[in-house]
Amino acid sequence: MTHAIVPLAFAVAARPGRIAPRVALAGAVLAILPDADVIGFRFGIAYADAWGHRGATHSLMFGTVLAAAVSLAWEEARSKAAFLFLALAAVSHGLLDTLTDGGLGAALWWPFDDARVFAPVAPVRVSPIGAGFFSLRGLETLVSELVWIWLPCFVLLAGSRVVRRAAG
């Protein structure tokens, strides 16, 4: 669920009224959605396949197309600002996953390139899949996410409040 905090933090930090609350919640859902690809394991799709975990659904193209579909289908999300917000929310998932210290990386450039990539630095502990999340390693992952994702989001929120107060 950590993926949802990023778009929610940006929506709250934005100028008041810029991102509608329902659009912000939709962004949170789009930020989480790429991990639904784990259902592929049940259908024999291997982790390393293009449609495996952290594959196509974690790409910049998939996130942008998904945001475009939502914007076209939902009147409340038909503005440029809403589309951009939803696109950034959707692609944030793959980008955050490149910051983890395990797995195969994320296929950010799919469909142009199936290669899995990591960011130059990987400070976030990779999350165990499934029930392994409720283990010591899962707790270590949660602490890592709190430090490297949640804390910067709270700093963004606090900074945006300071800037708004200073502006009047």
Image (cartoon, rainbow, N blue to C red):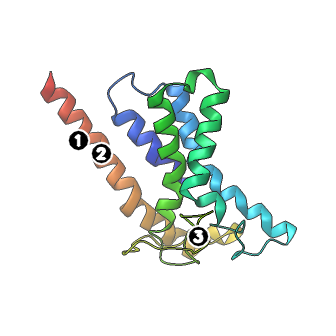
Q: Quadrant of residue 146?
A: bottom left
Q: Pointer 3: what residue?
A: 113
Task: Check residue 159 in the rendering and tell me which mark sits there, or answer none.
Answer: 1
Q: Camera-side residue: 113 or 79?
A: 113
Residue 165 visible? The answer is yes
User: Type of residue at label 2?
Assistant: Leu
Q: Pointer 2: what residue?
A: 156
The answer for how far apart the CA atoms under marks 2 and 3 are is 33 Å
State left or right for residue 31 relative to residue 154. right
Please state the horizontal and vertical placement of residue 15, each as a whole percent of the image: 32, 27
State left or right for residue 38 relative to residue 96. right
Name the residue located 62 percent from the left edge and 71 percent from the top edge: 114
Vertical side of 17 occupied by 148: above or below = below
- The secondary structure type at the circle numbered 2 is helix
User: Type of residue at label 1?
Assistant: Gly
User: Type of residue at label 3?
Assistant: Asp
Please state the horizontal and vertical placement of residue 94, each as a whole percent of the image: 53, 60
Around disc 3, counting alpha carbons within 10 Å, would you say few (fewer than 14), some (14 to 19), or many (20 or more)? few
Name the residue located 44 percent from the left edge and 30 percent from the top edge: 81
Q: Camera-side residue: 162 or 51?
A: 51
Around disc 1, counting alpha carbons within 10 Å, would you say few (fewer than 14), some (14 to 19), or many (20 or more)? few
Q: Earlier in the sequence, mark 2 or mark 3?
A: 3
The answer for how far apart the CA atoms under marks 2 and 1 are is 5 Å
Name the residue located 14 percent from the left edge and 26 percent from the top edge: 167
Vertical side of 61 occupied by 117: above or below = below
Determine contact: label 2, label 1, CB under 8 Å.
Answer: yes
Residue 2 visible? The answer is no
Q: Nearer the viewer, mark 3 or mark 1?
A: 3
Q: Quadrant of residue 113?
A: bottom right
